[in-house]
Image: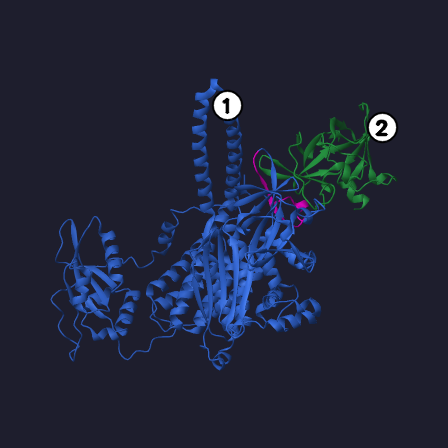
Amino acid sequence: MSDPRDNVQQEFLAEAQELVEALSRDLLLLDEAHHRGERIDPALINEIFRSVHTLKGIAGMFGYKHVGAVAHALEDLLDDLRLGRTAIGQNLLDILFDSIERFQSLLTLEDPQSPQEEAGVQHYIAAIRSIGIEEEVEDGDPIDKYAIDPAVLGVLTEYEEHRLRACIREGLRLYRLRASFKLMSIDDSIEALREKAQEEAEIITYLPSMEGGNDDTIELVVLLAARVPEEELNAHFESRYGSIEAIAERTHLPTLPPRRTSIPVLSMRPPSEDDGGQASLRSVADSVRVDIRKLDHLMSVVGELALVRSAVNRIVDSFKNDVTHRQSSMDLDRIGRGLERQLLELRTGILDVRMVPLGQVFNKLARIVRQAAREDDKQVRLVVTGANTEVDKLIVEELTDPLMHLVRNAIDHGIESPEARVRAHKREEGTLALNAYHKGSNVVIEVEDDGGGMNAHQLRDEAIERGLLTAEASQELSRQGMLDLVFLPGLSTRSEVTDMSGRGVGMDVVKTNILRLGGMITIASEQGTGTKITVTLPITLAIIRALIVTVAARTFAFPITAVQEAVPYVPNDVHTIHGRNVITLRGETLAICDLGQLFGLRKSGGREGRFVVIASMGHRKLGFVVDELIGQDDVIIKSLGKSLSSVRGFAGATDLGDQKVALMLDAPSLFTEYFEGPDAFRALESRP
Amino acid sequence: MSAAQKATLAPAPDSDTGAVAVLGVLVGNEAYGIPLACIREILVPPPMTEVPRAAAHFLGVISVRGEIITVIDLAKLLNLEVRHDELPGRVLLVDNGQELIGVAVDRVIQVYRLEPGQIEYASAMSADLSDYVVGLGRVQNQPAGSSDDMLILIDPVSLLGE
């Protein structure tokens, strides 16, 4: 159906995107290690080099000229870094981080060859090149400290030589290990050795020895650098690989005669060089990229199968009382149940495929945190928990922008400057925590900072000043109510627009986006201590469990996530406060709202025999009066058509079988309507 | 919408002679024509679910093979004085270019082929016609019950139902 070239293009973009994301993740690790002054894992730099290398390769194949050129320049820089010709510094890290944005914008170009981009790309490449090569200034080569056979030194690659130098400088001891390997399985065995060594040591190189070995085996001499003493190293390898001996340090005699073993000059290509392309090809082989629309389609097929199944069930039921068909009806019933189980499994399977870890978003946010902190001259430590929490792919996509804004806000307005923090007896470095976890069928994401917190009264005054709130109405506001004002359109606690909030979105837009996803956002803030924003979202949008109710002979469905409980409605218990009906439930006052009246389906309020469905959204609760409770069901939500999109209060509709449709109530919008009045919507809509 | 624009929205000819196939339907006692090309299906109305607080011309939503379809009452949309004391006779699934919508009518008459000479465009008429009307089609063998031998041609693109 679609143009095959488009598909190939999509494949490329998806793979390039993955590479850029991997690059971004690794750069963050590098940045963190650098800032803590930790030892930089050479494997990490190799990983970064490989991502860029692969990106360069595929960009070339698909005619993404600019991406290729940038990747090429970066590759050179990373190669210098890998070989120790350049040291890691702030400038270099900045240049590397810039590449992420640059790649992302270049990948979204309609014309990947676009000449308009030429100047910008060349400028950036010049910046990369200007990082230049800082030749190492040495007080004598550290390798001279050891009595290494010159024959070995002669065959080291530049990279190996650099690693050898670096290891010695870090104070690692050098060892020589001899081991024989079966020729048949030598690659795997060396890989196993490499892994085994990783915790304690680094393999610099290995070369075949001339002594051991026969037709089937070969003896290798492995040059190791280790942090641990000889005995421990021996214990680590459990003598499985033969003898380990320490290489003597030279004392005063730099020309100590070579040791007994002489290693022949026989070059074997070490696998650490240049296997990047292949490694990445292998790593994608067992996963498939799927267009989310294809999954949506499968999901609706499953939905239709469920409808077919209930139609079959009805026929089975009609046969049950018929004696002549007794046996076949029982058989059909059994088969029907089997079908139902398989259907459920199929549905679960498809839902599972749609799930992706939130870590994808968190990585993007980590970059924002770094950038924002640098622009603001603030010190921010990012603590992430629950990056493995899985959410529907669609939700993840829609979530990125709101979360990005929350994170920017937390750094921009929340966390104080280091000086201010010291004055407030806090650690200089602020902490921004991103926590994600499952709670029932919801996923909760918290953005929490230990900054200055929000000034509730200032918010209130600001709202009055801007005419968003009357002084009279402000009297009734609780502290929480004042904090919630931050979600009103056109309210910002800072009058000046900073560089960071330059995207022109406010908390009101964040809230609208979260509500659109069927979620809820709440705010908690203590002045001087910090702010915590909690976003609660459904795990998937496709299928939800619903409470089916009737109101004025019409059927509606409540998302079960919003429902706390249902209690019988007792008209005598209803009181009126400020024109609103309330009941008392276990000592707590609860506002109630008759759905029939709200929807204009009846004039009179509730009467005996009805029920109150108590829904909660964040810290708010509201009871909805309904006529009957029908039961719970898993339903597939379909959106209402475009023409009905302006009708408030419904999140969609669902087919209950038999072509009977129930409207799905949109709890967040009903809450907003009840507590803030229908005008709240108009205010939201007037914004772009 | 200007008259010129409306003319371009006229049913596209689907034969060499420029003839257009339209489905004639009865709403109240007036006959309307909807281009056949945009009609996907003619349904016996399934159970209708009313949408509270939607505009009056929305009858509600129906489920067609699992998809939720919004149904518009053509009579109410055109401000016809018709009483609906029962379900509509038929629901047409119409592709208005943006979504598949249901259009409720009282009865389906038949498919007509209108030659260019049989169509009179609204832009050429002085009569005050509704925004949803492209023009008039003159047909001979009208069935009994309709007031005249005119088909009022509906522009499907205008049936956005806002």
Count of marks, rendered view: 2
Residue found farthest to the front: A572
**Image coordinates for residue B158, horizontal then vertical, percent:** 74, 42
Residue A394 vs A680, above or below: the answer is above
Residue visible at 26% across and 75% down in the picture: A141
The disc labelled 2 sits on which kind of residue?
Asp
State which region is magenta.
A639-657
Residue visible at 16% across and 72% down in the picture: A248
Left or right of A571? Residue A60 is left
Q: Is A60 in front, or is A180?
A: A180
Q: Secondary structure at mark 2?
A: loop
Left or right of B3? Residue A48 is left
Q: In which quadrant is the C terminus of chain A drawn?
A: bottom right
Residue A525 vs A537, above or below: the answer is below
The disc labelled 1 sits on which kind of residue?
Phe
**Magenta span has A484?**
no
Residue A617 vs B47, above or below: the answer is below
Q: Which residue is mark 1?
A: A319
Q: In which quadrant is the N terminus of chain A drawn?
A: top right
Spatial CA distance of label 1 from label 2 is 53 Å
Residue found farthest to the top: A324
Label 1: few (<14), some or many (≥20) within 10 Å?
Answer: some
**Image coordinates for residue A609, horizontal then vertical, percent:** 61, 43
Label 2: few (<14), some or many (≥20) within 10 Å?
Answer: some
Residue A61 in sight here: no
What is the quadrant of residue A264 in the picture? Answer: bottom left
Q: Which residue is mark 2?
A: B148
Q: Which chain is home to disc 1? A: A
Left or right of A679? Residue A615 is left
Tell me, by letter, which chain the rendering colours blue.
Answer: A
Tell me, by letter, which chain the rendering colours green.
Answer: B
